[in-house]
Structures are given as C-alpha cells and as structure tokens.
Image (cartoon, grey):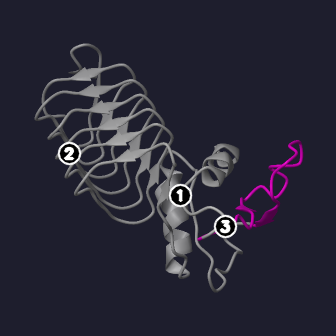
Amino acid sequence: MGRTFFDIARESIGYGSQYEIKGFIDDNLQALDDFEGFPPVISTIRDYQPQPDDCFLCSIGGKSRRQCMERMIEKGGEFINLIHTTARIGTGVKMGVGNLVAAFTSVGANASIGNYNMIQSYTVIGHDARIGDWNRIDTHVTCVGGTQVENDADIYTGAVLNHGVVVENGAHVGANSFAIRRVKAGTTVIGVPARRI
C-alpha cells in the first residue's frame, strides 16, 4: 500500500509546491528491494526522528496503523491531509489532519471528517455525514447523507450505509453489505441487509 500512496501523493494537491517525497519509513528496510522507481526506505519507525519540515502519511491498514502513527506523533511527527486532485470536496466540509481522500472520492456539502482517516478511491461521503477519527473506509463505499461513523471503525469495499445509520466505535461493516440500522460498538455486520455476526 505504501507504493500506492506514493502514486497518490504525486497526484495530490500540493505535490511539488507544498511537499516533496523524501522516502519511506518501514520496519523492513529491504521492503522495496524488488521494486524500481520509488524513493528509498530511509529508516525504521522506531529509529526515525522527525526532522524540521518533515510531514508524514500512513499507508498501513489494520490495527497496527494507529499504533505506528502514534509512535511518530509522540516524537513530534506531523501528519498532513492527502487529497487527490480528482476528489470532490463540497462546500462547508470540515476536515481535521492526517486524512487520505483518494482518487474520484466525493465528500458532500457540510460533511465533517475528523483526524487520521483513510478514505479510499471512488467512495462517497454524503452531505452532512460525520466521520470521526482513525477510520478505514475502503473503495466504492457509500455513506449516504447524514450517516455517522464514530471512531476506529472499518467500512469495507462496496458497503453502503443507509440514511441515518450510525456505525459506532470499533465496529466493522463487511464488504458489499447494506447497513440499514445502527451498527453497535465493537460488532461486525455483513450481508444485505447487514446483520451481526
């Protein structure tokens, strides 16, 4: 996913004028040995000390994502928003820091997006939707207007959240599922309509 982030970063708002790409930080220093055309792996997460003017993005998914980012934040690392040039950001949208808004994603009017979210390509965040912090929202997801995703949730590929749906803290909505009611904290739902498993 880091290689994908590299491509997204080169196609995002601010590349070449507000930021350049210095390199990768990875606990596997040989992670890119078999790949050409990428900047180097410059350090491990544990050993890297943020430098003046450094800014960070995180391509890690899953539970270790937050842990890795918090380790860098504790050392003074600053995460920026990465917004692809093809993304559509509506009027009155409020957005925190450290978010990815990938290619061909649409964020509707007056939506609110917190901090450190990964919102992948071709996703729709509807008008007045509220997205908290540390969420992973995969590709081709639709969060209908007015929906809410609290914190630390995973919404997997192709899922749809219907009007008024709230996905509570730490919940998961399975791929291609249609959530029509509240998804309780820490639970997983899947299917059409989505049911708890």
In the image, which residues are magenta?
18-43
Q: Is residue 117 magenta?
A: no
Q: Mark 2 and 3 residues: CB-CB less than 8 Å, in contact?
A: no
Task: Tell me which numbered mark, 1 or 3, is placed earlier along the sequence.
Answer: 1
Task: Tell me which numbered mark, 2 or 3, is placed earlier along the sequence.
Answer: 3
Q: Main secondary structure of the magenta part?
A: loop
Q: Is residue 30 magenta?
A: yes
Label 2, secondary structure: give it.
loop
Q: Amino acid at mark 1?
A: Ile
Which is nearer the eye, 114 or 93? Answer: 93
Q: Which residue is mark 3?
A: 45
Q: Which residue is mark 2?
A: 129
Label 3, secondary structure: give it.
loop
Cα distance between the residues tagged 1 and 2: 23 Å
Which is nearer the eye, 88 or 48? Answer: 88
Give me the residue at 12% from left, 28% from top. 181
Taking 46 as reference, is 95 left or right?
left
Taking 51 as reference, is 70 left or right?
left
Which residue is outermost to the bottom? 52
Of tags 1 and 2, which is closer to the observer? 1
Q: Which residue is mark 1?
A: 13
Figure check: 188 above or below 133 = above
Q: Amino acid at mark 2?
A: Ala
Figure check: 167 above or below 42 = above
